[in-house]
Amino acid sequence: MDSFLFSFMATILLLPGAASEVGTGHMGSIGVIVDNSSRIGKEEIVAMKLAIYYFNNKTNRQLDLHVRDSQSDPVLTLISARNLIKKRRVQAIIGLETWEEASLVVELGSKAHIPIVSLADAAPQWATDRWPFLVRASPEKHLQMKAVAAIIGSWGWRRINVIYEDTNSAGSEIIPFLADALKQVGSEIGYLAALPPSSAVNSSSSLSDQLQWLKGKQSQVFVVHSSLSMAERLFSKANELGMMEKGSVWITTDSITNLVHSMNSSVISSMEGVLGVKSFFQEDGARFQDFYSRFRQKFRSLYPKEDNHEPGIFAVQAFDAVWSVALAMDNNGSTQQLLEKIELSDFHGLTNRIKFERRRLAPQRMFQIVNVIGKSYRELGFWSEGSGFAKPTNGQIQNSSSMDILGQVFWPGGPTSTPRGWAFPTSETPLRIGVPLNATFKQFVSVNYDIDGGHRSVSGFSIEVFKAVLKHLKYNLSYEFFPYSGTYDDLVEQVHLKKFDALVGDTSVVSKRWDLAEFSYPYTEPGLLMIAPEKVETSNRAWLFMKPFTKAMWVLTGAITIYNGFTLWLIERNQNPELMTGSTLNQMGTLVCLSFTTLFSMHGGRQHSNLSRLVMVVWLFASLVITNSYTANLTSMLTVQRLEPTVVDVEDLKSANSIVGCSKRSFVVRYLVDVIGIKESNIKDITSAEEYAPALRSGEIAAAFIEAPYAKIFLAQNCKGFAASGKTYQVGGFGFVFPKGSPILPDISKAVLEVSENGELRELQNMLIGCQKCNSNITETSEDSSSLSPSSFWPMEAPTQLKKLMSREVLELF
């Protein structure tokens, strides 16, 4: 019901003079509206009456309490509020268990300037700002969602099912806080099951349908937030459906657990193994003990059919709410002054300090963790924000972020070991695994149909790896493949949308997709390669005649030649007067001429000394080896065909504005545009592996960008005419895709590592992908790779370091 209807009903129901001053002779009257048929309402009525009794005895003044039964009917609640304001002329109204009731009455109270003190468990954050006469006497309990998340995070459950009673407060206040708290511990809500309010006509059939639907889901961790009446039916039905057996986890919020003390044996036995979060209040003070004793007596007398008579948190809150209003009414004044005095309340209530901030009590910050066992329950310990779990031990408080500190937990089905929290897929409910229907390289995933199109078979390298991985799991997984036509991003999104339970195929692991799902450990190496056509290296290069020898070899040859000429000149100068005649410059010319004459001549002139002849014999052998080696290497360079890629660097493609090709169904397009900087208009879509080679040969595309696993297949199939060129971009790698929080994913990743470590993955690669067996697709050969160096003339047994040292020394010498 919207705000216009609130205002309209309030104007119709409220008559002039309804809020006039009360008569003399007593302090005034307080109106109470509760559901007298509910356990919460019964506890609140008894507690409020005790509060009036204590206050009247303490102050020797008379304060009246007028109680009305709402019967959980918002319309009846509104009529009761009008009656209290008009006929009973109450100065304040307390109660209103649900926000649906409170939202109606607060509009009426604002018109009459009557403070409405709400005990509703939840309300919108903006409520007190919109209605100035609304006071929330029930503390906000959204922090309990952090307690629930702490329990889930402590046991490592990743995906949670939430069952909640579909009221406005649950949808707007509880679910968002729980989702945020779960995110902080690395978990998430898998499925939301909204149940119609317990008063709805079809609530029973809807409850059965929702539970049957949740039973078929993989996650078996359930968080329940509902009224007590709904919880009683829910757990009874869950037991009938076998949903509270070994392996399942059930956690209840304080809307249920706060009343666990009031449940009869049949109800609580149906909740065996449940963990609950319960609002904490101290019960050891003298004042509370007196209240506890009187409460039990009065509750037993008023409600003899109730099995349990202990007060809970709702009774404590109702007592403190009445006490707050009574203290504010102690001095006569206007209703506006009464509201201000309530807001300024600051006293110690039955168990906690009562102080309002902006007409709201401070949030509840400490909760009890309870565990239902048999026909009773056990208090395991506490949880509070900042301190985590706590348990008093020998007079000391021990804190931990893990629930292990609270001791043994009794789980559904009786096991003491931690439940998995998820159900194994069965033949009735197999995993729905999506596979790409139109994979570019069919060697990875291939979907084939029989003649009539009825039966399909899925094969390929990715499929075989997945089957090998499943063999390493400690349990059996039933699954079924479902082909999907779309981009790989679309496939990952289908997992996020829960259309598929997993995705198996040649799906690359990239950060963008990680926002939607999670990946297993990659089963292929990452990498993006540039494939380009090869061309014959031309022989008309400048200074080609210098290429047979390296620079070091040229320097060494020149040095030995001059050294040899100098040695001959030094030996022959005494026997050959011609070597000593002339100027110094003339003699140097003679020495150089003598050096090169010995290199290109078999005799180099007549020697007069036997020592000179010995030098010449050694040098003639060396020169024969050097000249013949040079001639042979130069001939090889001129006659043997050498191949090199047409494109050696991606910058050449960008500067030439060349067209490149890739599959636009993959992430490669965005990577080329966003990271490498290629214009999107220069990217041609290649839809199948067979299109790459013709497009490259015809020049339709200058280069193709292919992921490393694909490149191995392409180069193996096209071993002549193409080569990988440029650097390898470290991106991608194929992995299996699972929803965020999937309990299977850690086991799958571990199994992938095992398959890789024991050699199975390599065998599959050799068998299904194949290796590059052709050596003709050499990328680019260095100019010096075929040139002869000094080390080429060393004996085989010569140390490698000595070879390098000599080559370096020769270069440094000259």
Image (tube, rainbow, N blue to C red):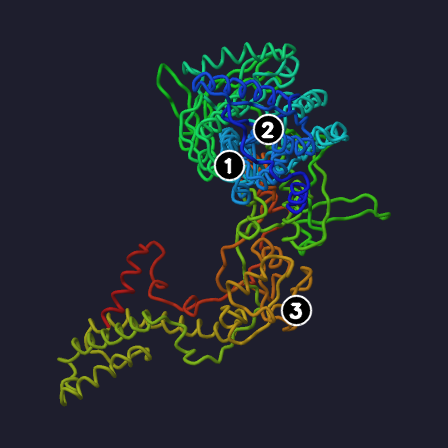
**Residue 783 visible here:** yes
Residue mark closest to the camera, 1 vs 2: 1
Residue mark closest to the camera, 3 vs 2: 2
Quarter of the image that includes the N terminus: top right
Quadrant for residue 258, please give it.
top right
Q: Give the labeled residue for mark 1.
A: 335
Residue 784 vs residue 281, the one in the foreground: 281
Residue at screen point 49% across, 64% down: 726
Residue at screen point 59% across, 16% down: 262
Q: Secondary structure at mark 3?
A: helix
The answer to which of marks 1 and 2 sits earlier in the sequence is 1
Q: Secondary structure at mark 2?
A: loop
Q: Give the labeled residue for mark 3.
A: 695
Q: Position of residue 385 (x, y in %)?
A: 43, 32
Q: Which mark is residue 575?
A: none
Residue 807's place in the image compared with 457, above or below, is: below
Label 1: few (<14), some or many (≥20) within 10 Å? many
Total number of numbered labels? 3
Measured in 3D between alpha carbons, the distance from the residue under mark 1 to the one under mark 2, in whole angstroms, is 54 Å
**Horizontal relation, residue 81 to residue 367: left or right:** right
Type of residue at label 1?
Thr
Q: Position of residue 465 (x, y in %)?
A: 62, 42
Q: Position of residue 423 (x, y in %)?
A: 65, 29
Residue 97 vs residue 631, the one in the foreground: 97
Q: Give the labeled residue for mark 2.
A: 421
The answer to which of marks 3 and 2 sits earlier in the sequence is 2
